[in-house]
Image (cartoon, grey):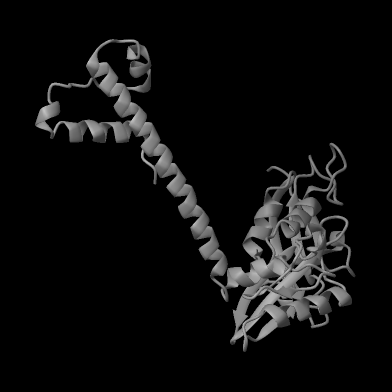
Amino acid sequence: MARTIQEIYNEGVTEKQQLASLQELEPNVDTAQNLLTDVTSNSKTAKWRLMLWVMSYLIRLHELLWDAFKLEMQNKANELITGTRPWHRAETFAFQFGDTLTWNGAKYTYPVINELNKIVKRVAVIEVGGQVRIKVAKLDSNDQPTPLDNPEYDALQAYWQQIKFAGTNISIVNKPADELHFEVNVYFDPLLMLSDGSLISDGSKPVENAILNYISELPFNGQLSTAAFIDAIQAAEGVNSPFLVSMEARSNPSPFQPISDFYTAEAGYLTIDPLIPIEDMINYIPYGPI
């Protein structure tokens, strides 16, 4: 890491002190402002101090250039580290639907980078039993994850067949959102909330909003936590005490399975069971101040 001008200058002064022939040149404790003030002085000491400060500046500039070069080389080296999960993730994001790969003598690549054709917007890479599973999704018009369509999925499969390491077992997971079903008892303050979950003040439904926000804000392939789910409801306006009665989820078309503590969606993302309105999953129970 490049030293500061002051550090280099001080090291120069320390080295000068080791030379008997230069002992008569006694520098002050200098700063850039001191030297700018002394630049018009006729003192040899002032000129010597100025020369040392200029050399210190040039040395720092040289060290900064070496730092930039080192960073560039490190970035290039990182790009060459292939076969890791981050590499699989980066290469999936780099997929361009509708474009052809070419061999450049070292690897397959796109001759022209077209950001508009990079349709994969969510990626997670996991390893299961010697298989690399790459979970993917694109975004719909509301910026919500949604599966690739069949031609897009087939193209992504072909892309990975070209660029993968020989012998690597890769599976592309491209599914609709896992479905979540739950039942929760919400004891609410009747001074603030009606029995349908709407606030008296503005008609909004903070419990439903809290649940939907919690689900939508989960990271791609992130874990749902039943404790965090209840915490989100607890923080909603008008809620006194929420209690989880049951929770289950499924990767369609598999049957629902109960969730005790955590759940990671097979598709990488979740949605509320579309066959049951969310308000039907919430039991509102008045429980005012005692």
Furthest-left residue in view?
20
Q: Is residue 127 positioned above or below 78 on the image?
A: below
Could you say where residue 257 lies in the image, as x and y percent from the top left?
73, 79
In the image shown, does 163 or 234 lie closer to the viewer?
163
Q: Is residue 157 positioned above or below 189 on the image?
A: below
Q: Would residue 30 be seen by someone viewing this image from the given angle?
A: no
Q: In which quarter of the image is residue 160?
A: bottom right
Could you say where residue 289 lies in the image, as x and y percent from the top left?
70, 42
Could you say where residue 243 lies in the image, as x and y percent from the top left?
69, 60
Q: Residue at x 39, y 43 (%)?
A: 2
Q: In which quarter of the image is residue 177?
A: bottom right
The C terminus lies in which quarter of the figure?
top right
Left or right: 226 as drawn, with respect to 52 = right
Q: Would residue 220 be seen by someone viewing this image from the given angle?
A: yes
Q: Quadrant of residue 277?
A: bottom right
Q: Which residue is drawn at 71% across and 77% down?
A: 258
Could you say where residue 74 lies in the image, as x and y percent from the top left?
49, 59
Left or right: 289 as drawn, with respect to 192 = left
Q: Is residue 225 positioned above or below 207 on the image?
A: below
Q: Which residue is drawn at 83% across and 79% down?
A: 154
Number of residue marks: 0
Q: Is residue 233 positioned above or below 53 on the image?
A: below
In the image shown, does 212 or 231 lie closer to the viewer?
212
Furthest-bottom residue in view?
167
In the image shown, does 19 or 250 lie closer to the viewer?
19
